[in-house]
Image (tube, rainbow, N blue to C red):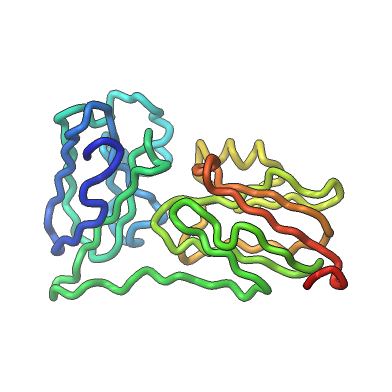
């Protein structure tokens, strides 16, 4: 751990190998696995010894469980697969991946990225939506696909007055979406679970990713069929 990054961000191990993270920076960090982004039958891991991601989050920032300068955390990986993790205080940019090979030395299959059967698809990169702006017709559906190992949300912050609110996680308000993101990490769009929404009401819809709200924003314009080029 150097500055605000894991170095390297991606590492490949053999089954049964132990990985040690060393904090070579001045600030404190954590190693916290995304519970939904590790193999189903794998042991959860987190500096501080937490048994779940929710417990690691509840511990809060600035915790005595953080890895301080020259401190370390180690974990032994027994199950082949892909493991995505992050630093809790610096999750916006500080993420990493561990790939554990099969006992025969082969790399495991890449995690499946599910594409929804929608009229339009928006891809989520590390810090952006592509496309950032999309014009559609009333009644058309949009699917957001997160093929990264980074947590992302789709959370509306502006909808037409008579339109249905939308947010990954099924929340009915922006306030509730933000609260649950900070506490339970609900609304996170994973590789195998895209988020979809059908837009019925013409107008402008602005949305963002809660974790990357300073850089990751998008817009849907719903226009009557005669106005769409």
- Quick one: 165 or 205, which is closer to the camera? 205
Q: Is residue 226 above or below residue 36?
A: below
Give the residue displayed 51% in from the left and 37% down from the top.
182
Q: Quadrant of the C terminus?
A: bottom right
Q: Quadrant of the N terminus?
A: top left
Q: Residue furthest front?
A: 229
Give the residue displayed 14% in from the left and 30% down from the top.
70
Give the residue displayed 58% in from the left and 72% down from the top.
116
Give the residue displayed 47% in from the left and 66% down from the top.
192
Seen in the image, is 210 located left or right of residue 198? left
Seen in the image, is 163 located left or right of residue 34? right
Residue 200: x and y, percent?
Answer: 81, 62
Q: Is residue 14 above or below residue 8?
A: below
Seen in the image, is 56 located left or right of residue 178? left
- Quick one: 138 or 189, which is closer to the camera? 138
Residue 217: x and y, percent?
Answer: 59, 49
Residue 10: x and y, percent?
Answer: 25, 56
Residue 64: x and y, percent?
Answer: 28, 23
Residue 169 in view here: no
Residue 223 in view here: yes
Seen in the image, is 90 located left or right of residue 122? left
User: For residue 72, what is the image quadrant?
Assistant: top left
């Amino acid at each position: 751990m150097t500055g605000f990054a894991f170095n390297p961000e991606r590492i490949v191990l053999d089954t049964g190998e132990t990985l040690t993270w060393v904090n070579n920076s001045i600030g404190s960090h954590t190693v916290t696995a995304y519970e939904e982004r590790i193999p189903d039958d794998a042991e959860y891991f987190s500096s501080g010894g937490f048994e779940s991601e929710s417990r690691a989050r509840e511990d809060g920032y600035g915790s005595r469980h953080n890895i301080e300068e020259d401190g370390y955390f180690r974990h032994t990986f027994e199950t082949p697969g892909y493991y995505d993790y992050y630093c809790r205080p610096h999750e916006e940019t500080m993420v990493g991946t561990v790939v554990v090979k099969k006992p025969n030395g082969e790399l495991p299959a890449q995690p499946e990225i599910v594409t929804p059967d929608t009229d339009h698809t928006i891809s989520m990169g590390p810090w952006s939506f592509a496309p950032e702006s999309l014009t559609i017709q009333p009644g058309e559906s949009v699917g957001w696909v997160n093929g990264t190992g980074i947590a992302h949300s789709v959370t509306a912050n502006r909808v037409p007055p008579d339109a249905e609110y939308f947010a990954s996680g099924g929340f009915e308000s922006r306030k509730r979406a933000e609260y649950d993101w900070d506490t339970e990490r609900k609304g996170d769009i994973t590789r195998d679970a895209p988020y979809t929404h059908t837009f019925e009401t013409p107008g402008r819809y602005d949305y963002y990713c809660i974790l990357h709200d300073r850089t990751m924003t998008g817009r849907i314009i719903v226009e009557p069929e005669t106005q769409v080029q």
